[in-house]
């Protein structure tokens, strides 16, 4: 994939690429630290159909969603042969009791039998996270387990 | 009445009115500059109300306003951006200079304002308003557009041209001869090159010299340095504003970012007073006689800016709608046209009608520029659709049959 980088003097840097469907999609990293997400219109690749300002947190969350989807799909593929095993993603919200706490404190595996196989954070993957990894708002936990186990893991993360 | 009391009352009333005008401009989504000018016209010589007490203050504040405008312009760009911008876009920049300087200069010669008048009016019609253009690009959601870097590169070139043009203008207005003028040009070129080199290699040191964690200390450092550099530049006949611009370029990185934040309110205040002071010195009754010329000039230089943007965008491989968008984004003239006209008028080397023409011209361009940028896209689309219609309607016709 070829990502173009263009300097915008006084504003920031634009990074974009053309998708297989012919749309130009990318971000402008503004000087002030915000990110502008844009998508071109279908009939004129020079102009933008939408240009959406994102805060740093929102950009990180969006990056996790896009990256997490990919990881989850690959995991689901890997577990396809084992019946009853499901992959699900949990995001850590600001009001979660484990926000800014080490993951081990939630005792997810002991209480629900679910394994956290990866954490998506700011577009990066933390594979097989240790119990001492501290969770933050916007983190996406990729969990593998049974349907019931995943339900109770979701409740643990939400209510403590 | 006590003169101090009178001055305070006048100043307070004027600043308060500017606040109302700025709010009105924000409400209808336009640049406040034309409204400030109209405000100045209303208060000044021959206007609705005559204000005498604040003249001296308005004059000095206006000068500070120009220094702050140019200082913040310099802070916008890093030296590296200027150099790469110059390398990438100099052809478009030269075309821009030729196409847009000549109409203004031509009209000045036609009206008998001589070489000095021609150089002043050429500058007024040449320089686009980077403030208005940047706001238009952000407001219309065109930051991600492909033609945007082309527009920005032209604006960068124009701003660097100002660094050479303003010293020349200052020297010519001071009435120095050909040799003296050449000498000033030499000094200006040397200073610009020197500052760019220093800023590229040692920008962080300049930043360190003014930087402070304490915002009060930082503000005083910045303002002191800007006025000092501007004063020294002025004494060397290199134009105070250019000194401030160069200081802005030399300050870089996080320091530049913080400096912009801290100086913005000061710049807004002093620049507003500068526009009013310019309006104060212009007699509104001198505008109607030059209005025809202003309209002609406005139309001609709108076309030349569109041509400039069109050509530059075409070179960058951008489609036809994008070429028109690039051209229209450049139409607005504003703060720097008034800076140029203001320098000329205070020197007394140009006739009063020049101020009237420049005022009327900037009023027209600051208002039509953003409108043109907004409506160019639907216009081009409608035009292209109607010229293509026969082909597009064919399948529909066969369906109906």
Image: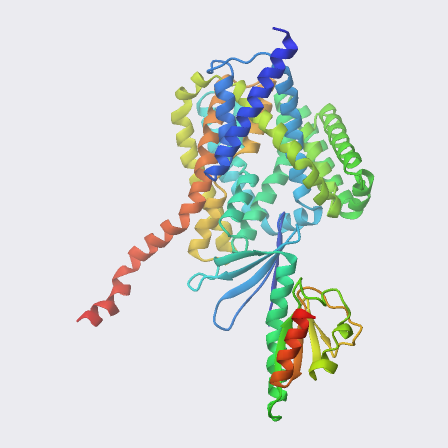
Report the front residue among A69 and A39. A69
Residue in the picture at 45% in, 18% down: B284
Looking at the image, residue B227 lies above or below residue A93: above
Q: Residue furthest top?
A: B1
Looking at the image, residue B6 lies above or below residue A100: above
Report the front residue among B212 and B102. B212
Residue B115 makes an appearance in the image: no
Report the front residue among A142 and B149. A142
Counting from the top left corner in percent of width and height, residue A154 is at 64, 75
Counting from the top left corner in percent of width and height, residue A136 is at 71, 65
Counting from the top left corner in percent of width and height, residue B232 is at 76, 27
- Report the colour scheme: rainbow
Horizontal side, residue B85 vs residue B27: left or right: right
Looking at the image, residue A53 lies above or below residue B189: below
Residue in the picture at 77% in, 38% down: B215
Horizontal side, residue A120 vs residue A43: left or right: right
Residue in the picture at 65% in, 11% down: B4
Q: How many marks?
A: 0
Residue B376 makes an appearance in the image: yes
Counting from the top left corner in percent of width and height, residue A88 is at 61, 79
Q: Quadrant of the C terminus of chain A?
A: bottom right
Report the front residue among B307 and A56. A56
Residue in the picture at 58% in, 48% down: B153
């Amino acid at each position: 994939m070829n990502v173009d980088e263009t300097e915008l003097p006084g504003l920031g840097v634009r990074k974009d690429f053309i998708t297989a469907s012919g749309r130009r999609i990318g971000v402008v990293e503004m000087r002030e630290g915000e990110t502008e997400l844009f998508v071109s219109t279908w009939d004129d690749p020079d102009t933008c159909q939408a240009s959406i300002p994102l805060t740093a947190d929102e950009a990180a969350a969006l990056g996790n969603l896009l990256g997490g989807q990919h990881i989850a799909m690959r995991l689901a593929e890997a577990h396809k042969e084992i019946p009853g095993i499901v992959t699900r993603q949990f995001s850590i919200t600001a009001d979660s009791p484990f926000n800014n706490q080490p993951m081990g404190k939630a005792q997810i595996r002991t209480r629900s039998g679910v394994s956290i196989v990866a954490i998506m954070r700011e577009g990066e993957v933390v594979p097989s996270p240790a119990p001492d990894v501290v969770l933050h708002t916007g983190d996406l936990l990729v969990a593998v387990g049974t349907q019931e186990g995943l339900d109770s893991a979701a409740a643990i993360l939400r209510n403590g | 009445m006590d003169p101090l009391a009178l001055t305070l009352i006048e100043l307070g009333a004027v600043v308060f009115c500017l606040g109302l005008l700025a709010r009105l401009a924000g409400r209808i989504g336009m640049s406040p500059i034309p409204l400030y000018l109209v405000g100045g016209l209303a208060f000044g010589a021959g206007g609705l109300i005559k204000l005498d007490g604040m003249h001296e203050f308005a004059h000095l504040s206006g000068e500070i306003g120009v220094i702050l405008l140019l200082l913040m312009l310099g802070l916008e760009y890093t030296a590296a951006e200027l150099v790469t911008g110059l390398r990438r876009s100099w052809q478009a920049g030269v075309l821009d200079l030729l196409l847009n300087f000549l109409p203004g200069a031509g009209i000045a010669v036609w009206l008998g304002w001589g070489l000095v008048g021609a150089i002043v009016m050429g500058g007024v019609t040449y320089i686009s308003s980077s403030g208005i253009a940047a706001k238009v690009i952000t407001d219309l959601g065109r930051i991600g557009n492909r033609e945007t870097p082309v527009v920005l590169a032209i604006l960068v070139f124009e701003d660097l041209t100002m660094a050479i043009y303003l010293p020349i203008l200052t020297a010519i207005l001071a009435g120095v001869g050909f040799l003296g003028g050449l000498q000033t040009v030499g000094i200006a070129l040397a200073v610009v090159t020197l500052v760019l080199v220093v800023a590229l290699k040692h920008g962080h040191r300049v930043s360190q010299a003014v930087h402070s964690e304490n915002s009060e200390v930082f503000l005083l450092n910045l303002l002191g340095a800007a006025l000092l550099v501007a004063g020294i530049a002025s004494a060397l006949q290199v134009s105070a504003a250019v000194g401030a611009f160069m200081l802005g370029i030399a300050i870089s990185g996080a320091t530049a970012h913080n400096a912009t934040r801290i100086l913005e309110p000061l710049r807004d205040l002093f620049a507003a007073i500068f526009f009013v002071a310019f309006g104060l010195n212009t007699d509104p009754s001198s505008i109607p006689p030059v209005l025809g010329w202003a309209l002609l000039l406005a139309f001609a230089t709108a076309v030349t800016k569109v041509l400039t943007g069109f050509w530059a965008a075409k070179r960058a491989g951008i489609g036809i709608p994008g070429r028109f968008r690039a051209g229209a984004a450049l139409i607005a003239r504003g703060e720097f046209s008034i800076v140029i006209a203001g320098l000329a008028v205070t020197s007394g080397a140009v006739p009063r009608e020049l101020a009237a023409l420049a005022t009327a011209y900037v009023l027209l361009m600051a208002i039509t520029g953003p409108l043109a940028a907004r409506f160019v896209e639907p216009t081009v689309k409608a035009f292209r659709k109607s010229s293509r219609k026969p082909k597009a309607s064919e399948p529909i016709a066969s369906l109906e049959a």
